[in-house]
Amino acid sequence: MSIAINIYYSGVDGNAKKFADEMESSGTADAIRNEEGNLRYEYFFPANDNETVLLIDIWKNQAAIDIHHASPMMKKISNLREKYNLHMKVERFISDDAGISSEDKKFIRN
């Protein structure tokens, strides 16, 4: 099992991109990637929305997320969200560990 959290950060005047850039340049994103239980921490930019950045954040389990949320790292992230005046939309997905079905594999080009 793993837990994927999609966070859409939205702002104005390119602030979402500036936020992601500062998370990367400050080393904060890498520090999160190195936390126990983090499986993925990566930013993406929607082709149809220049004022939003998507964070895909995947964790081994809820305990790893809870430890992350209790860490000093969250204060840094919160401060940056305030600095760039970002709003968030959050989606959460829990994997079933079944993998990709043989039917779905027919549509995947490797």
Image: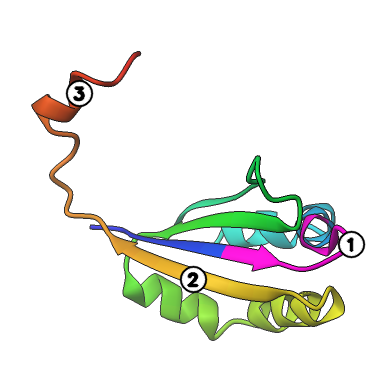
Of helix, strand and loop, which one carries label 3?
helix
Q: CA distance from mark 2 to mark 3?
A: 28 Å
Q: Which residue is mark 1?
A: 13
Of helix, strand and loop, which one carries label 2?
strand
**Where does the magenta region start and end?**
8-17
| In front of the other: 44 or 73 | 44
- Side (left or right) of 40 relative to 27: left
Can residue 36 be spotted in the picture? no
Residue located at (60% from left, 55% from top): 54
- Side (left or right) of 89 relative to 98: right
Q: In the rendered structure, which disc, 2 or 3, sits on the residue that comes first in sequence?
A: 2
**Quarter of image, res 91:** bottom left
Above or below residue 77? Residue 70 is below
The residue mark sitting in front, 1 or 3, is: 1
Does the magenta portion include 14? Answer: yes
**Whole-percent x and y of residue 14?**
85, 57
Q: CA distance from mark 1 to mark 2?
A: 21 Å
**Quarter of image, res 11:** bottom right
Q: Which residue is mark 2?
A: 90
**Quarter of image, res 5:** bottom left
Q: Quadrant of the C terminus?
A: top left
Residue located at (69% from left, 50% from top): 49
Q: Which residue is mark 3?
A: 105
Coloration mode: rainbow
